[in-house]
Image (cartoon, rainbow, N blue to C red):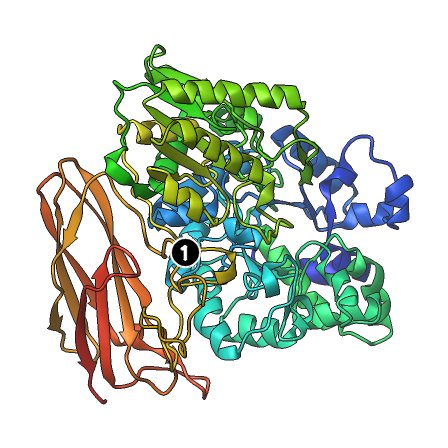
Amino acid sequence: MKQEDLKKLLCSMSLEEKINQLSQLTGSLYLEGAELTGPLKEQGITEKEMELAGSVIGTFGAGTVKKLQEEYMKKQPHHIPLLFMMDVINGFKTVFPIPLGQGATFEPELSEECARAAAREAAASGIHVTFAPMADLVRDARWGRVMESTGEDTYLNSCFTEAMVKGFQGEDLGRKDSVAACVKHFAAYGAPEGGREYNNVELSEHTLREYYLPAYQAGIKAGAALVMTSFNTLNGIPSTGNKWLMRDVLRKEMGFDGVLISDWAAVDELIRHGYCENAEKAAVCSAEAGVDIDMVSGIYAKKLEKLITEGKISEKLIDESVLRVLQLKNNLGLFENPYKGADEKEEKKWCLCEEHRKLAKKAAEKSFVLLKNEEQILPLDMKKKIAFIGPYTDSQKILGAWSFIGDAEDAVSIKMAAEKVFDAEKVTYSRGSLLLGDQVHMEGFGRSFSECTGKEEQERMLEDALEKAKEADIVVMTLGEVFLQSGEAASRSDIRIPKIQRKLFEKVRKVNKNIVVVLFTGRPLDIRKISQKAKAVLCVWMPGTEGGNAIVDVLRGNSAPEGKLPMSFPYNVGQVPIHYNEYSTGRPSQGNDEKFCSRYLDIPNEPLYPFGYGLNYTRFSVSPIQLTYGEERGQVKAAVNVKNEGDRAGTEVVQLYLQDVAASMVRPVRELKDFRKVTLSPGESAEVNFEICEKDLRFFDEQGRYISESGKFKIYVGFDSRTENEAEFVLLPE
């Protein structure tokens, strides 16, 4: 449909019809058997609102979507199709590693492939919009939703946000296998006070612009069709009603001209925040801030018409929002084909297909981070007796909190994978303990978790584990969080693995000290004591559908870990929020016993494992940095020689960091600016080149400008954020 035709359509719509295009309802209301009685009646939802609502959330399946779309369009006065939206975060039916795990790959192009595969499956099942990627910068491991981000670094997040948007949307939104991406949560949702979900955020404008906004900008530049508001207040104003943030920053400065949607019932929450005294005021504030779609609160549908009639809000403002929604539907090709990609045959073809499962295994393998490997205990010697012990040994619940469309039954557990390749006479398996303990019940996104095993059975599991540990040469302990312990509404003050598992670890270690820990988690954990005592620690995050196959292949050396930490692992929870790119202080700790400096009395300042850290099955070396200068101001080329010093092939992530030594504002001790992945055979070396330009040296100054200043800069090139391989250059005055 041409632009002029969209405008004609808009002009022909009644005010009621226009307003309801801005209203989103839950898809369950439209399913067979739903009646406007009970809860629905209590919510005040009318048949008219259902007939006119512009979009729904949470309904999928090709047959279901086509049926609902057909029934809807029969009643819709202008036959405007519904938008079907859903959270497709790290996969659809085929589930890939959680986004934090994908960040550990340092390979954005791989995440683009994963997003493309997820889009194929989702589109075939009738989905038009996914609420992803999450571009929120995260520094506090207590916050459960760090699993949905790609980590603590601005540059890395920006790379992955751009890649995921491109993956979901493809080259053309109108293609049957594309879905519209929604960058979220705008803005700074990843910095809640105390790491507590839905909490307030206080940030200086400098910190906001320097660290938190760039990843959103990257997604918008990549063409993201939607942006979602965040639940938090930002410096005292809820994001959903923040006119400066949405109109001035998002629309004008960042150039976003797509659809802005609230998060779940966030318009209503303006009242709970104490920012708006009633629903009418909440509707006005949200609309004036530029929120186009009200997700499920019903306030737009109930209040906007009266507010327009009374002159409290301009109909022109509503028209602008409606036109953006119509434009999105047009870009998706829904006016030509309201069913778009929904197709039962395509759904069956793509969901959990072999191609996608292979990609899931590849992504999982590349996401694993080897944190420790004492005595080169990994890869496992297949000739030795090995005992797999721990509650994740035969668990298929390894998809992550947001993968509620994928089925755990489709996932491959460690035991399922190991039984295919290990000698049955040399390998034993034992659960050893419960994941959380008896009497524990957790719920989230329509799923629940509980363990109801009596004390006698628990004692039997423990005895079985200890007997098998005694007989083994090596014990592989599969430990970690429950999948519902991270994700939305999953903030934790104690970020250790559950107590019952820690007890199992200590008991096993008393009978066998050759322990390899395989760590399942949705966040950085305090694993200090376990790390001190285990021979090896392999962090596998929540690895997805092919997790078991990927883990077993890495453990036995058929493939090798190559992941790097996208978030620092703290020494303990008292350090968080913690991040590598901190500001210099006037009294930095020198690593000695000096009292009057910036340090803790009881723990080190440094994290247990820093950003960018990760071991290999081989050893790499890096040469001193060689600098050459280009013709343009600030243009510097940095070259290093990387060599595989070990006896097997491996992949290393070469990372470049910059430090502005002295500036008009205090600058971070270092910042990631680029990275390269190199794969080398034993004894092989390769030159790795980076190029720095003046733009890389800029920062946000107190006058609100992005500038670079002349002076000394340090370049660091190595294998994690602590590298001391440095060189200096000077940016000359203009």
What's the residue at 31%, 82% (across, down)? 708
Q: Is residue 13 visible?
A: no
What's the residue at 40%, 26% (across, down)? 511
What's the residue at 55%, 66% (across, down)? 188
Question: Which amino acid does the dot numbered 1 rest on?
Answer: Ser
Identify which residue, 395 or 345, lies in the foreground.
395
Q: Is residue 152 visible?
A: yes
Percent position of residue 576, x then y: 50, 61
Report the side of 27 relative to 544 (left or right): right
Report the side of 375 relative to 165 (left or right): left
Q: To which residue does mark 1 refer?
A: 568
What's the residue at 9%, 43% (across, down)? 684
Identify which residue, 205 or 379, lies in the foreground.
379
Q: Specify the quadrant of the image occupied by residue 707.
A: bottom left
Percent position of residue 322, x then y: 68, 61
Quadrant of the image containing the C terminus: bottom left
Where is 46 relative to 417, above or below?
below
Identify which residue, 1 or 38, lies in the foreground.
38
Q: Secondary structure at mark 1?
A: loop
| Label 1 packing within 10 angstroms: few (<14), some (14-19), many (20+) | many
Report the side of 299 relative to 170 (left or right): right
Percent position of residue 178, x then y: 49, 43
Identify which residue, 721 or 90, lies in the foreground.
721
Q: Specify the quadrant of the image occupied by residue 312.
A: bottom right
Farthest residue, direction top: 425
Report the side of 684 relative to 566 (left or right): left
How many marks the image carries: the answer is: 1
Where is 715 relative to 169, above or below?
below
Percent position of residue 246, x then y: 60, 71
